[in-house]
Image (cartoon, helix red, strand yellow):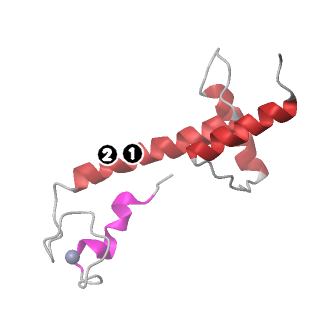
Amino acid sequence: MAKTVAERKAEQRKRQKELGVTKIELLVDNQELEMIKRNCVLRMPGREPYGIVEYLQMLIRKDDAEYKKQVEKLSKRKCKRCGDILPVQQCCMSGDSECWVTSGYKELKLVI
Ligand SMILES: [Zn+2]
């Protein structure tokens, strides 16, 4: 027997709860919304476009993967001041020009 809308919704909520899904509210301006909608289509030429949620979820995962790659590369270096393996999150020498914490964020921050 076909499930009712309420039953399907209840199942979806149960699945999402099991996955630990959290709903977040996201405010975007007209320009950003236009970029999202456009790129959902342009990133899948000739195919079914990405859904907005799917597209944003993939950007999150893409950035996470990129961050991990950057950290792996950084971990081959050490802070010149304290000798800790990069990236250093906190250092008592922060502010010292030789300490990685002073300007290391520039190597990890998001760049457009
Ligand atoms: Zn340091």
Residue located at (76% from left, 54% from top): 29
Residue located at (82% from left, 24% from top): 3
Q: Is mark 1 within 8 Å of ligand 1?
A: no
Q: What residue is pinned by disc 1? A: 66
- Residue 70 screen position, x and y as percent: 31, 50
Q: Is mark 2 within 8 Å of ligand 1?
A: no
Query: Where 43 falls versus 109 (above or below)?
Result: above
Q: Quadrant of residue 59?
A: top right
For badge 1, the amino acid type reads: Glu
Q: What residue is pinned by disc 2? A: 69
Q: Is residue 4 left or right of residue 41?
A: right
Outermost residue on the front side: it is: 1
For badge 2, the amino acid type reads: Lys
- Magenta segment range? 97-109
Query: Where 75 falls versus 88 (above or below)?
Result: above
Dots 1, 2 in contact, CB < 8 A: yes
